[in-house]
Image (tube, rainbow, N blue to C red):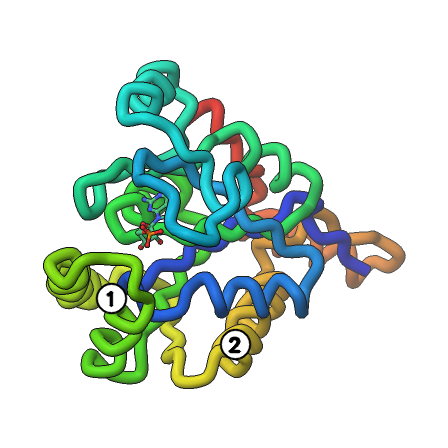
């Protein structure tokens, strides 16, 4: 009786560095092949084990700034002294193909997306405790102690912004957290504003259509106009 929009959902996932965003997303993607995780651009140096053009597009600060000037970034921010940002074009392409696009980004970038695309879905991932977060940051062994403490301090600031998000997931178990992320996608797909069309067979359904049309905000996401 109803046809839903072809365009996928845009999901923004934030959470303090070290809270397990990437692990949770990897599991969520395995569970749900309709998720496409955007590949960010960064001026940070690659860590051991990171794959070029897969973990990130690694560029120099001036290359990053050139991309900003050319309007190629949907959002960007400076975090721990480095640029991070989402390339606009591939996000639009995957949304239009019907993929649910996942942006795993820090809060300044998330707030830029919220400003531009209020219909995106904002999910915040929390560690089970701050003590556990510090332990995970240290355990990664990828940063100096000074950088770990800097990230830990930023985590407190980020958690203060929790109320700007729509959903919160506590990551005390990565599989359960990924299940919750996919459950959010499923629920969001049931929202009335995802309806594109109502099929008309009876007088009753025709009446329904008039009601639905009034309420629907059917505008697809157009990144070029932002
Ligand atoms: P890391 O250096 O640990 O890979 O990332 C540092 C922070 O930058 C993390 O919170 C991560 O989610 C965030 N980040 C990664 N990609 C992007 C992006 O494209 N835009 C923004 N704003 N933040 C990002």
User: Is residue 15 rendered to the left or right of residue 94?
Assistant: left
From the Cβ of disc 1, is ligand 1 less than 8 Å away?
Answer: no
What percent of the width, then of the height, locates residue 99?
66, 48
User: Is residue 21 rendered to the left or right of residue 102?
Assistant: left
Q: Secondary structure at mark 1?
A: helix
Residue in the picture at 72% in, 57% down: 207
- Whether the residues at callouts 1 and 2 have beta carbons within 8 Å, the answer is no
How crowded pointer 1 is (Cα within 10 Å; few <14, some 14-19, many 20+) is rated as few
According to the picture, the residue beneath numbered tag 2 turns out to be 180
Disc on res. 163 = 1
Quadrant in which residue 145 is drawn: bottom left
Q: Secondary structure at mark 2?
A: helix
Residue in the picture at 33% in, 16% down: 66
Picture quarter with the C terminus:
top left
As displayed, is residue 10 above or below residue 162? Answer: above
Quadrant in which residue 186 is drawn: bottom right
How crowded pointer 2 is (Cα within 10 Å; few <14, some 14-19, many 20+) is rated as some
């Amino acid at each position: 009786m109803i046809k839903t929009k072809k365009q996928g959902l845009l999901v923004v996932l934030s959470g303090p560095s070290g809270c397990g965003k990437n692990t949770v997303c990897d599991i969520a993607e395995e569970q749900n092949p309709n998720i496409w995780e955007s590949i960010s651009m960064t001026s940070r140096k690659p860590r051991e084990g990171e794959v070029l053009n897969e973990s990130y597009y690694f560029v120099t600060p001036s290359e990053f700034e050139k991309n900003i000037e050319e309007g190629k970034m949907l959002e960007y921010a400076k975090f721990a002294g480095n640029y991070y940002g989402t390339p606009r074009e591939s996000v639009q392409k995957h949304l239009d193909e019907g993929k649910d696009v996942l942006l795993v980004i820090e809060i300044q970038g998330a707030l830029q997306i919220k400003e531009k695309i209020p219909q995106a879905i904002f999910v915040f991932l929390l560690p089970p405790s701050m003590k556990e977060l510090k332990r995970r940051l240290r355990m990664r062994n990828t940063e100096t102690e000074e950088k770990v403490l800097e990230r830990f301090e930023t985590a407190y600031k980020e958690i203060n912004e929790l109320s700007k998000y729509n959903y919160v997931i506590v990551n005390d178990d990565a599989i359960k957290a990924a299940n919750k992320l996919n459950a959010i996608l499923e629920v969001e797909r049931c929202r009335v504003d995802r309806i594109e069309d109502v099929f008309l067979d009876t007088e009753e359904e025709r009446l329904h259509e008039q009601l639905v049309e009034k309420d629907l905000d059917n505008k697809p996401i157009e990144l070029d106009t932002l």
